[in-house]
Amino acid sequence: MKPITNPVPYSAYKDSGVEWLGEVPEHWEVRRLKRICRLAYGDSLTTDVRQKGIVPVFGSNGRVGFHNSANTEAPCIVIGRKGSFGKVNYSHDPVFAIDTTFFIDSRFSSTHIRWLFFLLIWLRLDGVTKDSAIPGLDREDAYQRFAAVPPLPEQTAIARYLDYTDRRIQRYLQAKQKLIALLEEQRQASIHQAVTGQIDVRTGQPYPAYQDSGVEWLGEVPEHWKIRRLKSLVRRIDQGVSPQADNYLADGNAWGVLKAGCVNRGVFREREHKRLATDFVFDPILAVKNGDILVSRASGSPHLVGSVGRISALKYKLILSDKTFRPIFSQEVDPDFMVLAMNSRYYREQVRQAISGAEGLANNLPLSSLRAFFFAVPSADEQRDIVAYLQGLTNRLSVAATQAERKVSLLNEYRTRLISDVVTGKLDVREAAAALPEVDPLETEADSEEALEPTTEPAEEFEAIAEGA
């Protein structure tokens, strides 16, 4: 497959007259957005009045359902007006744009709609808002934004080039996102196998003999392991307070109180706190410190309730909130082993059952339930071996995931810069667009697992871009 022809700068430029826009191609026009398009208001369509159909319903974040009729033509652009204001979505088909959005189709702009989509991405309309209780995109302010407008044939070439390039970038990004997800699945599976004794980490083989744990969702465990409730493995479980606090970070000698989201999927997030009033008096036992294990009692999302993480470093002075538990384990268990066990699937199943059965405590983990949770406990030596094995494995997987995440981040930056360079005329893509095949070979590939793997030439091309971005 031939690589994409590299675009080059235009031969002549002029001053746009707009300081932040700089020079633009000599034959382009500089216009305010109000002379490029009209932002039409979407219509009200509550879920209870939607009719069964195949027409996508678009909100500020994209598709939110289906209906039997559309209020746009095709293709169209839908822009978030409330909520995720300024977010730009595109559809090849007619949609129903609801009243939290603006939309644009051929009735409201004489430009190439796909070119306009990329232009609006570059304009970053999420920065155009009025100060109000409910921030949103202000249409009149958006209309005042300047943009450089090429002739219609060039708009078509720009849309063609960016479409082709963007599809290739998205394929690469999908492959990397899939890799990151697979690495996390491998980590979770390895933790579960090790902390339930399905595999003896010292040999890589199952244990010679197993026993029924007596717990339906735990199944069999090694014969010499013990089944214990959490309350028998701790000296105590601390819970914090719920004081009035300022909704910004502690600074200097100020103290902060942790919020519910301070532990997320095993990761401690220190900045998830609010600053306490300077005259607030608290029991010193509530102060958190390095090495503490924290359990989230509450969250807006059920899958985050009961998240467990250990503090490895602290920059702020913090105390526990009433949304956070801190188990203090007895000497018979390794705290790091318990953190791993509390990040396993069998622990998550207990959390799920506990919050589903807690009447009046939606998405809250009762302390009584946490204390009653079952754990499979090996000998002290085995606990240490499991910790060492899983820490080594996790470190290796984390390195691979971090490398993939870095490439995703760099390529997203490259995509943003490329769109900016093309729609502002820093690069002339007319020749490159003309050289593109009529059908993008990547579009004709089956959406198979193999098609998303980063092993094709375009992927190698973007590996190089990511490294050099």
Image (cartoon, rainbow, N blue to C red):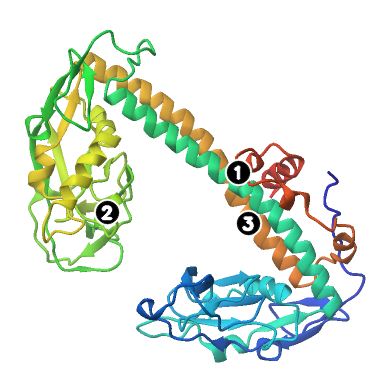
* Mark 3: amino acid: Glu
SS class, disc 3: helix
> Which of the pair 271/259 is nearer the observer?
259
Q: Earlier in the sequence, mark 1 or mark 3?
A: 1
Marks 1 and 2, how far apart at CA: 28 Å
Q: Is residue 251 left or right of residue 85?
A: left
Secondary structure at badge 1 equals helix
Q: Quadrant of residue 236?
A: top left
Q: Marks 2 and 3, Cα distance to the nearest angstrom?
A: 33 Å
Q: Amino acid at mark 1?
A: Ala
Instruction: Name the foreground residue: 452 vs 427.
Output: 452
Query: Residue 101, how many percent across, how many down?
Result: 50, 81
Amino acid type shown at disc 2: Pro
Binning the other alpha carbons within 10 Å of mark 2 as few (below 14), some (14 to 19) or many (20 upward) gives: some
Image quarter in which the N terminus is found: top right
Q: Position of residue 315 (x, y in %)?
A: 31, 49
**SS for callout 2:** helix
Pointer 1: what residue?
Answer: 175
* Label 2 vs label 3, nearer the camera: 2
Question: Is 226 left or right of 313, judged from the image as shown?
Answer: left
Q: Residue farthest to the front?
A: 52
- Of the residues under marks 1 and 2, which one precedes in the sequence? 1
> Which residue is found at the position 22% from the left and 26% from the top?
219
Q: Which mark is residue 413?
A: 3
- The residue pinned by badge 2 equals 302
Residue 330 in view: no
